[in-house]
Image: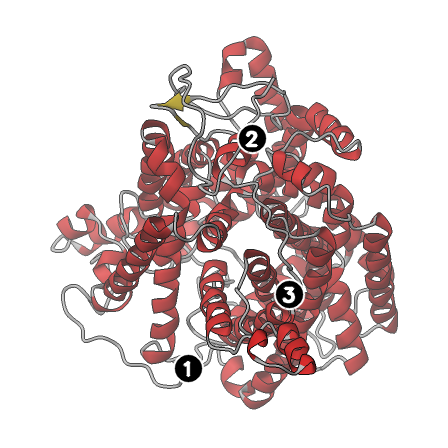
Amino acid sequence: MTKEIVVTEEPSVALDSKAHSASRELDGKDSLGLEDKDDTVYVKGHPVIKTGLDVSNFLISTRDDEDPALTFRSVALGSLFTALSSVITMLYVFKPVQMQVSAVFLQLLIYLFGEAWAYLTPRPDHFKWKWLRVTLRFLNFGQPFKIKEHVVASLIASSGNNGLSGVEVYAVERLFYDRSVSASTAVLATFSIGLCGFVVAGLLRPLIVYPAEMVYWTTLPQVVLFQNLHFDRQANRKRLTKFCWALGIAAIWEIFPAYIITWLGGFSVFCLASMHAPTKTRSIFTKVFGGASSNEGVGLLNFGLDWQYIQSTYLSLPLKQQLNSWIGYLIFYPAMLGLYFSNVWSAKTFPFMSTSLFASNGTSFSTTSILNEHNTVDEAKLQQIGLPNLTATTVWGYFTQNLAIGALITHVIIFYGKDMVLAWKTARSRTQPDPHYQGMLKYKEVPTWWYITLFILAFVAGIIVNAKGETTLPVWGYLISLLLGGFIAPFSCILYGLYGSGVATNQISKMVAGAVQPGRPLANLYFASWSHQVILLAVNLANWLKVGQYTKVPHRIMFGTQIYATLLGAGLNYAVMTTIVSSKREILLNPEGNNIWSGSTLQSMNSQAITWALAKDMYGSKGRYLLVPLGIFIGLALPVIHWGLIRLFPRLKKWPINTALIVSYAGQYYYGNTSWIWSSIAVGLFSQFWLRRRMPSIYNKYNYLIGAALDGGSQIVIFILSFAVYGASGTAHPFPTWWGNPSGNPDHCM
């Protein structure tokens, strides 16, 4: 039986000094870890964090001060920073440099404002009038800023972009189809798209939230930071001092790779060695070793020291996840390069890495050239101009995404099926052994009918807007989109909870949309938005419900604030979108844009919609890219092969292989910056393979805390630089060109 563990205010300190066997080479097993036994490994008296139960027992405190969570201050701060995050995120949809406000950045800002609210406002007991004391207490004047208030405010602020997908569709519609949905359609569709996915997480929370193994690893830095900021500040002073130092150093450092010495964002020995080589050699080296610039190359052995790209993710993801990603990279490099240099799909006619569409001669493909006045595909024009072409690397990216989706479904059923049934039964009987779950039993659970009622309202809203015809998506297509998202969402949540990362699932939404709505790109956009949002919102809500379980925020408050934040953020996003699209229409339609405004994000969305509207011609039985849809069926077979090999060679069971993750990482970065990949591998090896196993006392105390500090420091500086020198405020101020900041690729590849 598992030993009873009593956790003090030092949540990261091991309490049991009994030594166990040495740490195994590979950790984690393909189960939900529901066996009730003590297999914790200790090094010098400190536990090695391997499983979700280790996280619950040794890393996260079970302390609950029963302080209020839903207060005027928490809602006010959450609303204020929802406005900040949603407006900035929407603003950057129309900028040449894309940026999102990180959750840790918001968490730190809210903490500073919350502490200022507590210390700079008068205490109620200083006044003799009762009505004034009551008012000041309601406003939380002079009262300590507690952890649950902080969590709720951060939850509201971080959930403000849940409805962003729908608003982006409206923007595409206004720009490229010269039409605007009515106010009623905008309200109802935003409500439906923004909330339709909550029901999946709500109904399945006994399976995807309550078990100890459903950790959602990438949120651990936030949870640890919450507790270190609020629990026993005197005892945690040393840790908080180190946090502040790390944040300051990260902030100062970020200025160099992001602005002054961009070479630090990606340096390659091979690129430097080829600086004076012939052009042909440099071209090859750039594709193989370059990666500091977007779409430059695959970045083999290219290291970047820019933390905005690495982030604390690789300090948080468990070793079993990172092992699978490393195997995926071993496939990624030869596949990407092999396809191009073998000229598969006429690869050499087009750029090496690009998500754009191309004509058969390699020139850019105009999406509007094949549309009629109703913005649907004109078959006569299509026959005259011809089908668009994709780069070979993009095809590989699409193919591996479908492989991962197929493998995800089969892997979960084969390897987690029995554990899922057991997890459901233990949660329904309220016997789930996780101490944090047990600590939440004193709070009223959200009734199932709340989730069902919310879904019915969102569902009916979607029926109304699609029946009106403004979305061009018929009601039966809308139903298929929800069924597709609802089917995929549980599998995605389980993988995300166990491994800290999922697989890209938006590809299947676009593919099915193209199959059921051929020739209708706008319907494709709406179909994919509803379908993918079901999956995305299920993961987001499950993630925050887990944070609430760790920090003991009552269930009903988590539910209510998620809905409030989603609707508030969507409204703000819509207001910003309509203002910018109306005033900057011409420059947003320009393929190049300028240094201030760019419609590239929306142009890409429209291009993908048109591509998938041609699914029958491009991906059908006679299509050039038939392999892409076949990827789902091939992916379904991969875990079966894995299972068969385990039956033949039982020792393979000790290896935490997940074929869905492997094939996902085999093509996940087929575009963009790749110089950070090897740096992330180095960070993962240091944190999860060496520090966690050899020095667990330091790992347990500082790994997640320092990771949060590095994220916060880099995000603060990137936010400032975006407005100060990158041109977000209207005028760019680039740093002078020199060897460390070259005019071309920062890594000195061609």
Where 534 falls versus 169 (above or below)?
Answer: above
Q: In terms of image quadrants, where is residue 105?
A: bottom left
Mark toward the viewer: 1 or 2: 2
Where 207 falls versus 173 (above or below)?
Answer: above
Q: Pointer 1: what residue?
A: 596
Residue 517: image x %, image y %? 76, 59
Q: Do the residues under discs 2 and 3 have CB atoms within 8 angstroms? A: no
Reading the chain from its start, which is encountered first: label 1 or label 2? 2
Reading the chain from its start, which is encountered first: label 2 or label 3? 2
Q: Pointer 3: what residue?
A: 165
Q: Residue furthest bottom?
A: 583
The residue located at (28%, 52%) in the rendering is 304
Q: Pointer 2: what residue?
A: 53
Q: Residue furthest front?
A: 128
Determine the CA span between mark 3 and mark 1: 23 Å
Reading the chain from its start, which is encountered first: label 3 or label 1? 3
Q: Residue furthest left?
A: 276
Residue 426: image x %, image y %? 75, 29
What amino acid is at disc 1? Answer: Ile
